[in-house]
Image: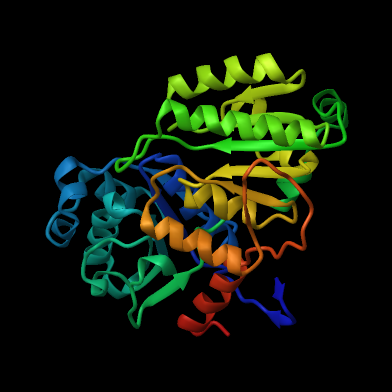
């Protein structure tokens, strides 16, 4: 692999474990990192007990039976990748057993002493710094260009019936904020305006956080004003991420760093539709992407612009190589 003329070394020959509790967004982050480091990683699904998720530091003195069994029946890992505070205790537990024989890489801010991990990848908008911290610009992207291109031509032709195909990706409820019905209604009105202005076609992909009321609003409003639109769940008909091959414009709601980061790696024009209340850290992240000419604010218009692409995966790989002295 080469990045801007530099040869990038990877963890070839090493055993890498990705530990996940099946939370999709966090698992995608771990898989994204494992993919750029080592194509032969092992994905292990494991749900930590409640007290280990709540108090991750207990991993120093407690090793779940599941992990003990995994260590007996699998090749010992050289690297362990985890994401999110709920998996931090699992990383600490493995480190307490294997000590210097394993390198632990944790994604996101665990809100613990940084010394509990060998390396942390934390979004720069969290403003966490340390000798073993790599600040990333947004989230790592699990999207693979080869996977996107694996799209059956016959299926492609059935979906895209107009020249301008617009993808709307919708998030939804979070711990800190639940968008009002009126906000989904306003989003619909702006999207309809944009679609009609370019004589386009709309595809909507909803997330697991999208409330039922929002889906009902989309179906009701779009069916009255648009002749060409479809709504899909993330994995329905296995359209995502392959469908990105035929998309011309992308609109993403402002509540998800993961979704924005993934779409920001593409060359297609990317527009952010803002909810009335936003996480301050996400707002700073989006503001930074605007300055870098990666995204535009969606206000009912879609247009071409000279878009820069987010290079989080490549830049992170360079820094990891430097940190572990693989260069």
Q: Residue at x 77, y 63 (%)?
A: 306
Estimate the x, y position of residue 157 in percent, counting from the top left: 87, 27
Q: Quadrant of residue 61?
A: bottom left
Question: Whole-percent x and y of residue 278?
Answer: 40, 49
Relative to 30, is 262 on the left or the right? right
Q: Residue 48 in the image: x percent, y percent?
A: 25, 44
Left or right: residue 20 versus residue 313 is left
The residue shown at (21%, 44%) is 65
The residue located at (66%, 65%) in the rendering is: 293
> Which one is in front, 277 or 242?
277
- Residue 1 on image: x %, y %: 70, 71
Is 4 in front, or is 178? Answer: 178
User: What residue is drawn where x is 72% and y is 42%?
Assistant: 244
Side of 158 relative to 122 (left or right): right
Q: Is residue 158 visible?
A: yes
Measured along the vertical axis of the image, is residue 243 above or below residue 159? below
């Amino acid at each position: 692999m080469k990045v801007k003329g530099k040869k990038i070394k990877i963890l070839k020959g090493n055993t890498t474990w990705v530990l996940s509790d099946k939370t999709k967004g966090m698992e995608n982050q771990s898989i994204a990192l494992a993919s750029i480091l080592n194509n032969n990683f092992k994905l292990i699904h494991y749900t930590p007990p409640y007290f280990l998720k709540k108090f991750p530091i207990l991993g120093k003195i407690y090793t779940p039976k599941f992990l003990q069994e995994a260590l007996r029946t699998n090749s010992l890992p050289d690297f362990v990748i985890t994401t999110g505070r709920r998996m931090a205790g699992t990383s600490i537990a493995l480190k307490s057993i294997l000590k210097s024989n394993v390198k632990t890489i944790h994604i996101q801010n665990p809100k613990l002493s940084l010394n509990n991990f060998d390396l942390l990848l934390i979004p720069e908008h969290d403003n966490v710094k340390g000798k073993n911290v790599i600040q990333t610009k947004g989230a790592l992207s699990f999207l693979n260009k080869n996977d996107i291109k694996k799209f059956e031509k016959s299926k492609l032709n059935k979906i895209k019936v107009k020249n301008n195909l617009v993808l709307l990706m919708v998030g939804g409820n979070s711990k800190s904020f639940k968008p009002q019905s009126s906000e989904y209604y306003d989003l619909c009105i702006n999207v309809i305006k944009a679609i009609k202005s370019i004589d386009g076609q709309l595809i909507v992909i909803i997330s697991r956080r999208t409330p039922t009321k929002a889906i009902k609003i989309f179906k009701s409003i779009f069916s009255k004003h648009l002749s060409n639109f479809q709504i899909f769940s993330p994995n329905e008909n296995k359209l995502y991420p392959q469908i990105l091959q035929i998309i011309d414009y992308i609109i993403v709601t402002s509540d998800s760093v993961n979704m924005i980061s993934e779409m920001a790696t593409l060359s297609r024009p990317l527009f952010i539709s803002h909810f009335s209340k936003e996480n301050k850290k996400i707002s700073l992240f989006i503001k930074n992407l605007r300055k870098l000419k990666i995204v535009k604010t969606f206000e009912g218009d879609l247009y071409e612009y000279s878009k820069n692409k987010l290079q989080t995966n490549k830049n992170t790989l360079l820094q990891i190589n430097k940190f572990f002295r693989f260069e």
